Image: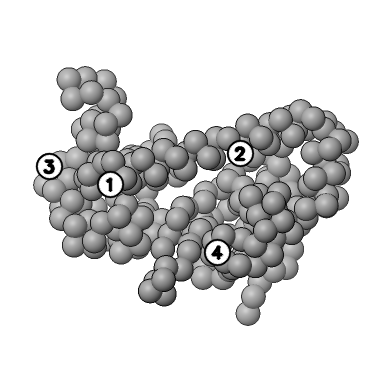
Amino acid sequence: MTCHTCINAEDGRLSCLSRVPVFTQLSDAEVDLLHSVMQTSHYHKGEFIFREGDRSDSLFVLNRGIIKLTKLEDNGKEHILRLLFPGDFFGQFALLQEKPHYASAQAADTTDVCRIYRKDFLDILRRSPDTAARFMTALSGQLEEADGWAAVLTLLEADRRLAKMLLYFRQKFDPSSAEFTLPVSKKELAGMIGATPETLSRKLRQLTENGIIAVSNRKLRIIEEAALRRLAGEISPQSDNI
């Protein structure tokens, strides 16, 4: 059963608006307009928000849960391009260009998603130059992040790619906590960093034996953050700062 019904609409809309920087400085009139046109939907793990090739007519905002953006390779295997976390918005490139979605969006766990249709969203951008400017800045940030990850996957070795990904997950979940649950399976994580499952297992074992992390199934705890950040290249080997 596909669950596209609205749930706790008013609370969901308010939460979506508060999560995304693009919407945080809207006027009261613009907030009221968004409330009137925004829908909040609930998806179970494994359900698709949209599939690769579908026509786009909406901007989506992830309010709760995790979403996988995936693309089918020529051999039929699914490849995770990116994970989306609460506050991330997606579908905007196909929306603005009126093109089919280049990837599929699938719920990785129980998720709540807010949706604004193209006509309503473009109308808000036309009415509010400040909102349009913030939206363009947010798009630029997404492209910059994508370029950064492309460089990571192309130029860095597997252990550094893994360290960066683990720090990224921790930042997205709770920067104040050293513990988090891997949002994807270890096989999927291996694919995300361009490694084989065997290589990933070996790298995780090395990090565990060196006392940098502790892993139990998909539960992970960062023990020596400075060491992990040095491995990721975020601080110099000579630095003792976290």
Q: Is residue 125 left or right of residue 17?
A: right
Give the mark toward the camera: 4 or 3.
Answer: 4
Q: Residues at badges 1 and 2 in contact (C-beta under 8 Å)?
A: no
Find the distance from the CA under tag 4 to the CA under tag 3: 38 Å
| Crowding at mark 2 (Cα within 10 Å: few <14, some 14-19, many 20+) | some
Mark 3 lies on residue: 210
Residue at (41%, 34%) from the top-left corner? 176
- Visible in this render: residue 170? no
Nearest the viewer among 218 and 51 is: 51
Residue at (15%, 41%) from the top-left corner? 211
User: Label 2's element?
Assistant: helix
Mark 2 lies on residue: 139
**Badge 1 amino acid:** Leu
Label at residue 124: none
**Badge 2 amino acid:** Leu
In the figure, 15 relative to 217: above or below? above
For marks 4 and 2 on the same chain, the one whose residue lies earlier in the sequence: 4
**Badge 3 amino acid:** Asn
Mark 1 lies on residue: 162
